[in-house]
Image: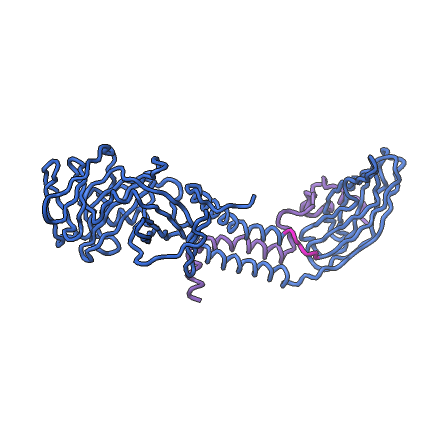
Chain colours: A blue, B purple
Amino acid sequence: MSAPAQPSAAPSAQLTCPSCQQSITYYDVAGSEYYACPHCHSYFRYHGEGPPKLFGKYREVPNDLGVLPVGTPGTLAGQACRVVGYVRRAEAKTPHYEWVEYQIFRPATGDCVQLSQFNGHWMIIQPAKRNYDVQAASTRAAYVSQPGAQYKLYNRYQARICYAEGEFDWDIEGDDQLKVAEFICPPIMLVQEKSKAGSKWYHAEHLEPAAVVEAFGRDKVVVPARMGVGAVQPDPTDAMWPGLRNLTLLALIALCIVQFGVKRSSKILFTDTLHVVADASGTPGTGKVIVSPSFTVGQQGPLEIDLTTTVNNQWLELPVSLVNEQTGQGFEFTKNIEFYNGVEGGESWSEGSRNADAVLSRVPAGRYHLNFYPFSEAGPAAPDIAVTVTADPPLWSNFLTLLALILAFPAFQLWRSSNYETRRWDESDYAPKTDS
Amino acid sequence: MFDFLSDLRPVRYYALLLLLPLGWFVWGTNTGTRLLGDDNESTETLGAPGTRGSHGSAGHGLYFHK
C-alpha cells in the first residue's frame, strides 16, 4: 500500500494567538472561525477581520492528546484530508465517560467530518442533511424507523468540553447546551442534537481501527486497544449467517434424505413370551436358562431386542446372548429391570420400568437364537418376559446424534451473537428489556 | 446461484468439516451401525471354539448351542 496521500495543495494560513502571541497554523481558511491554541490552550474566535475575541482557557490539559495530532495528513475513504481539530468531551452527568473527536478537514470538498473514538471504537460522523422522525420519543424505547432498519435509542446525554486544540467552524463551547440522543442500527448510528433552535441530525458509521491506521499512516498511528463492544461495532457473526443458514439447511436435507430415503424396512423376526422358572439347584433367585426358538437374520444389519417383563416390586438381572448357530459368533448384553409401586399417604407411586431394549449393530446374516440367564429377587413370583426381535430398526440415535452435531455450531454462533448484543447494550441505559 | 456460493465463502472450512459427520452418518446407515456404540458387551468376534477370534474365554455365547 502506498503512503497516505498528502493534501499538499491545501492552503494553510497563520494567525497569532491573542493570548500568548504565538503563531498558529490553520488549514480551513474559508470555514474555520473558532480556535483553541495548542500553546497556551486559549479558546478564541477570529473571523478574518478585526481583533480576535478571547473566551477563556482550558485549565486541565490531558496527558494523552490523542493518537492523531492536529495537522496530521491522511486519506480517508479515498479523499485527502487533514486533522485540524481535537476535542475531548465527557457526559455532563457522568464525567468518567470521556471520548475524543477529531475534526477532519477535506480540502477537495471544503467540508469537515468528525472521527470519534471511545474505548478504542471509532466512528466517522457527518451531517445527515435531513431530519428523522423519532417514534415513542418520550419513552426509553424511542426509535427511528427507516426502510430495512430500525434505529433503537442507545443513549441520551448532554456533553461538556474537557479540552480542545485546533480550528473549528462552529462554537464548540455552545455544544454544552445541546441535548444529544443516539439511535443505533449497527454499523450505523443516527445522532440527534436538539437545541432551542431545533434539531440537527448526524450520520455516524463504525470504522475499524485498522482503517484509521491505514488512513493516517501505519508508521505514525498506534490506535488504542478496543474495550468491550462498540455502540455500532458490527457483530462478527453477521457475515457468516447467510452461509451458515444455507449450509445448515443443506445438511439437514441430506440428513433426512439418508434417514428416510434409504430404505431399510424393519421386520419382526421373532416374538414370544418366555416364563422364568426358578432353578432349585442354584442360588436363591437364579432362574433356569431360557433358550428361545431359532430365527433367521436375512441380511447384515442392526437388531433390536425388546424386553417387556411382568416384574412387580422386584428386580430382574437379565444377561442375554445372541448366538449364531452356524458360526458360533456371539453377542451379549445385560439388562437390569426393576419396577416398584405402591400407595403412600393416599397417593400411588411407581419407580423404575418393566421394559428394556437393546440394539446390536452389524449382526451378520444367519440363523440365531437367544439365551436368557435370569436372576431375580428371591421371594416374589418369577416374572414372564415378552421378547420381540426386530431386524433393521430405524437408528434414531444416529439421526439425533447427527442432528445435534449439525446444529451445534449454528447454536454456538447464535449464543455468541446474543452475548455480543448483551455486551453492546451493557454500555447503554436504554437496553431493550428482556422478559425474565 | 452465484449469491448462494458467495454466501458460503465465509463458512467454507466449516462446510468441509461438516462432511465428516455426514459421511460418518451415511456409513452408519449403510452398515447398520449405531454410531455411539451398541449394547453388545461381548469381546469375542467369532465365538465358536476353533474359529477366528476365539480364545476359549468367550461369555455366554459359547453355551447352549442348539
Return the residue nearer the eye: A306 or A22.
A22
Please count the marks in the image: 0
Q: Residue A51 is drawn in which quadrant?
A: top left
- Give the residue drawn at x 85%, y 46%: A384
| Residue A360, above or below A21 | below
| Residue A63, above or below A241 | above
**Outermost residue to the front:** A196
> In the image, residue A127 lies at what x, y percent?
29, 54
> In the image, residue A121 lies at what x, y percent?
34, 44
Return the residue nearer the eye: A269 or A224.
A224
- Give the residue drawn at x 41%, y 59%: A146
> In the image, residue A418 lies at what x, y percent?
48, 47
Question: In the rendered structure, which segment of residues is drawn in magenta?
Answer: A392-397
Tell me: A56 left or right of A271.
left
Tell me: A194 left or right of A371.
left
- Give the residue drawn at x 64%, y 51%: A397
Q: Residue A41 is drawn in which quadrant?
A: top left
Is B1 one of the magenta-colored residues? no
